[in-house]
Amino acid sequence: MKACIFHGPGNLTVEELPTPTPGPGEVLIQAQAASLCFSDIRVYKGEKAANPGVVIGHEAAGVVVQVGRGVTKVREGDVVAVCPVVACGRCYFCVRGKQNRCVNRWTLGYQGNGALAEYILAPEPLVSQGHLLKTPPTMPADLAAMVEPFACALYSLEVCRVQHGGTLAIIGSGPMGLIHLLIARAIGCATIVISDPMEERLAIAQELGATTTVNPTRNDLQKTVLELTDGLGVDAAIISVGNVAAIQAGLRVVRKQGFVNIFGGLPPGSVLPLDPNLVHYDELFLTGTQNAPTDQYARAVLMLASIPQARRLITHRFSIADAPKAFESRMAMNGLKAMIDF
Ligand SMILES: [Zn+2]
Ligand SMILES: [Zn+2]
């Protein structure tokens, strides 16, 4: 099988590997679609750790072609989206339904072989924890591959208690910012302000239902948000870009008792200068989310079926043989989601 292997920052190769055979509890999936995530790009850039020699990528959908002894959760022929989190099911966090914070966690595409391969071997704990999610027959494979980012954004919005009729600011109109926007629309957020310095990204945000778009190089985000919210600020700000200035911008646009979620990872060594009195007197919640528990994955599958416009985010398509070109394209900030079709 062809697979895209990460050897170190800036070093990816497409190689021929033996197709794995599932052992007890394991499942072999024939890939149908895999999408690139900005965290894969961060691995490629050397900002985020992954083991050299692994198959990179963690957003995938495919068909179950072989199941190991004892597998009961899926059967041959099932089409599944993959949650790449391998959780133990026994630790403090797992037993409380927070599989994404499992103390024994490892993740496909980082510590074990991931999504950018013609076949994916799902390990036993991933299968037994319900992290192969059956998708409806009507769902296209490329949409199913995006269950992972949708689960992450759904979790992010739920941690921030975003609700119907609420107000939201999204800083960063890249793929993850736009996915937050699509879900916030589906939840019924009344005001969704999205900010990005790239005009073409703001145009897509407008098309996908943002109520206001702001280019912070031309307009003052804080002023715009305060005008739209009777001077209060928004209920929550999602920081969907990895820089300190964006977090500071988020802190300036939320209302008292509002949430600021650091959704995007930052380059190592980043330091946030913070006025603690702002958090104290305004009773702000400054939080972070990373990946998502099983619950949000299960609901992301159901939710995505009703958000077909999510496919608008797919702007580039590549074959597995050209997977390194997909990384170069995303590094150059071309378009939004890059999809590998099998
Ligand atoms: Zn992802
Ligand atoms: Zn655990």
Image (cartoon, rainbow, N blue to C red):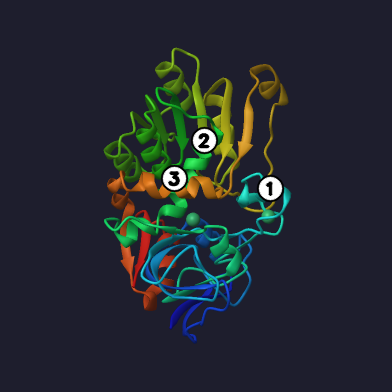
**Circle 3 SS class:** helix
Disc nearest the viewer among 1 and 2: 1
Q: Residue 97, how many percent across, how many down? A: 61, 46
Could you tell me how far apart the alpha carbons at marks 3 and 1 are, in whole angstroms? Answer: 20 Å
Residue at 45% over, 41% down: 172
Mark found first going from the N terminus, 3 or 1: 1
Looking at the image, which is closer to me, 143 or 201? 143
Would you name the residue on which mark 2 appears?
158
Is 125 drawn above or below residue 13 in the view shown?
A: above
Q: Residue 132, how many percent across, how many down? A: 48, 61
Disc nearest the viewer among 2 and 3: 3
Q: Residue 62, how many percent across, how many down? A: 38, 67
Mark found first going from the N terminus, 2 or 3: 2
Looking at the image, which is closer to me, 23 or 220? 23
Could you tell me how far apart the alpha carbons at marks 2 and 3 are, in whole angstroms? Answer: 12 Å
Q: Residues within 10 Å of mark 2 (few under 14, many from 20)?
A: few
Looking at the image, which is closer to me, 259 or 292? 292
Would you name the residue on which mark 3 appears?
299
Whether the residue under disc 1 has CB within 8 Å of ligand 2: yes
Is label 3 in contact with label 1 (beta carbons under 8 Å)?
Answer: no
Residue at 59% over, 43% down: 289
Which of the 4 image quadrants contains residue 36? bottom left
State which quarter of the image contains the N terminus: bottom left
Would you name the residue on which mark 1 appears?
93
- Disc 3 marks a residue whose amino acid type is Arg
Looking at the image, which is closer to me, 51 or 329? 51
Mark found first going from the N terminus, 1 or 2: 1
**Circle 2 SS class:** helix
Q: Residue 149, how many percent across, how many down? A: 46, 51
In this rendering, position of residue 328 left or right of residue 268: left
- Disc 1 marks a residue whose amino acid type is Phe
**Circle 1 SS class:** helix
